[in-house]
Image (spheres, helix red, strand yellow):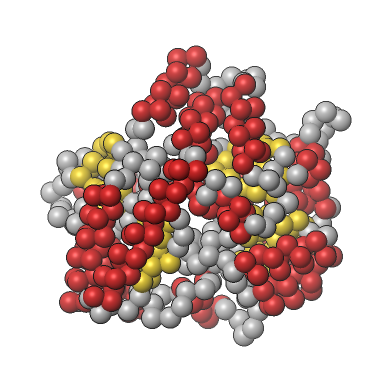
Amino acid sequence: MYPDSSSSSQRMYDRALSSLPGGNTRTTVFMKPYPIYAARGEGCRVFDVDGNEFIDCINNFTSQIHGHAHPALIKAATEQLALGSAFGLPTESEIELAELLAARLPSVDQVRFANSGTEAVMMALKAARAFTGRPKIAKCEGAYHGSYDYAEVSLDPTPEAWGRNAPVSVAYARGTPDNVLADVVTIPFNDAEAAVSLIREHGAELACVLVDPMPNRAGLAPADKTYLEALRMVTREVGALLVFDEVITFRLGFRGAQGLWNVDPDLTTLGKIIGGGFPVGAIGGHRDVMAVFDPRPGKPALPHGGTFSANPVTMRAGLAAMRLLDAAAFARLDTMGEAVRSGIDTAFRHHGVPGGTVGLGSLLKIHFADRPIRDYRSAYLTEQEAQRQAVFNRALLNRGVLAAGYGLMALSTPMTDADIDAIIEAASGALKEVSAS
Ligand code: PMP
C-alpha cells in the first residue's frame, strides 16, 4: 500500500533529496510524500522498485503509445546503437521520419527535428516571428506548451487573476520578464468570439496564434470545430500564422487532431509518440514558412542546431513506432478509449459521485466537477473537487493503476480487453472510496 515508509521508493527518495532539489528532476513526476520509483516496464505494465505491478495509464505523459519495451522499438533502437548513437553528420533516418510525417499531415511539407516538445514550440514561435517580422504571440489561457518563457505565460492563473472580461497575461514562473508578458496575448479557449476580437485587436503585431486542439492542462476538452475554424479565419485575416501544438494530440489519429477537425495550421509542433520512447520534438509546416530554417542562402532567418537533434536512435525508434500506428491501431485505441470513458462515466453515476470523463481517442481526463468542462476556467477545481481527486488518485494507485496526478489517463496499444476491464474496475473501486469519503 502507498505510502509505505519502509519501502525502497521511500529510501530512494530520501537519498535523492541530497543531490536533487526536492529529490526531483521533473516537477511533473513529483508526488507527496514520495514518488514511486520505476524498476522496469513491459507492455502496458510498470513494476516499481518494491516489486509492485501497475497498469500504466500515465505512459510517460502520453509518449509511450506502445507501452514499454516494445520488441519492434527495442530492435530499431539497439540496431542503431550498434552503429553509433549520434554523429556530427546527418543520417538517412531523419529523411525517412520527415517523409512519414509529411505524408501523414496535409499541412506539413517539411520538418525540422528537436529534442523535446518544449524546443519544438520554442522554434515554432521563433519561426513565426522570423517569418512575419512581428513580435507577439497569442495562446490560450491554461494551455501547457512546455517551458519556453512565452509559451508558459498564463498557464495557471488563479481566479483572482482572471480579470473581469478577457483573460490577462500572467507569469507562470517567478522572474518572468515583463516584456515577455507584454508580448503574449492570452485568449480564452473555446470562446471564438472573444478570441477573434483579441486577435483582431493585436493583429498587426501578432506573429502567430498557438493552440492545442485538446489542451490537457486546460481540462482536455476538445476544441469546438467552429473555434478552430474561427482561429484559422482570423489568423489569415490579420496575417498571423496558426500554430497547432500536436505534441499530445498527434496520438488522436492517423493525421493527428488537424485530420480529425479538418483544419490545416501553418505550423505544427510534434513530440512524444514520434520518438518511439526517446527524447524528441519536431516542427512541421508549409515550405514557404519552413524556409526560415533553410541554410542554403547563408545564415538562415532562424538558425537552429541541437547536438542531439535528429539523432539516429530517436529517428529509428520513432520511425518504428509510427509505422506500427496504422489505421487499425488507431481504431483499436479509439475503441479502448470509448470503453474506458463510458465505463468510468457509468461508475460515476453508480457511486453517485459528481463528475465524469472528457477526452477523445486514447486520452481521457477524470473530472470531479458537476458542470460541463469547456476550457481552463470550467475545469478549475474547487477545494472539494481537489480533495475528491486526491482521494481518487490514491485509491486508484492502490488498486494497481497509474494515472497522472491531475487526472489524465493515456492508453497504449499493448492493452488487452482484460486490461481495459481492470482499469474500469479499479476506477470504479476508487470512486466508491470517493463517495464514502
Ligand atoms: N506541448 C504540449 C501540448 C505538451 O503536452 C508538452 C509536454 N507535456 C509539451 C508541449 C512539452 O513537451 P516536452 O515535455 O517534450 O518538452
Q: Is residue 79 above or below residue 282?
A: above
Across and down, in percent, residue 205 comes to 81, 63
Horizontal arrangement in the rendering, residue 12 relative to residue 413 (left or right) = left
Across and down, in percent, residue 151 comes to 62, 57
- The picture quadrant where one finds residue 363 is bottom left
In this view, the residue farthest toward the bottom is 164
Across and down, in percent, residue 326 comes to 49, 39
- The picture quadrant where one finds residue 371 is bottom left
If the image is split into quadrants, where does the C terminus sit?
Answer: bottom left
Across and down, in percent, residue 37 comes to 27, 44
Q: Nearer the viewer, residue 247 or 405?
A: 247
Residue, x 22% and y 76% (percent of image)?
A: 351
Residue, x 40% and y 28% (percent of image)?
A: 72
Horizontal arrangement in the rendering, residue 416 relative to residue 254 (left or right) = left
- Number of numbered callouts drawn: 0
Residue, x 27% and y 42% (percent of image)?
A: 46
In this view, the residue farthest toward the right is 297
Q: Is residue 367 visible?
A: yes
Q: Nearer the viewer, residue 178 or 267?
A: 267
- The picture quadrant where one finds residue 66 is top left
Horizontal arrangement in the rendering, residue 318 relative to residue 2 (left or right) = right
If the image is split into quadrants, where does the N terminus sit?
Answer: bottom left
Q: Can residue 124 be seen in this view?
A: no
In this view, the residue farthest toward the top is 83
Residue, x 33% and y 56% (percent of image)?
A: 403
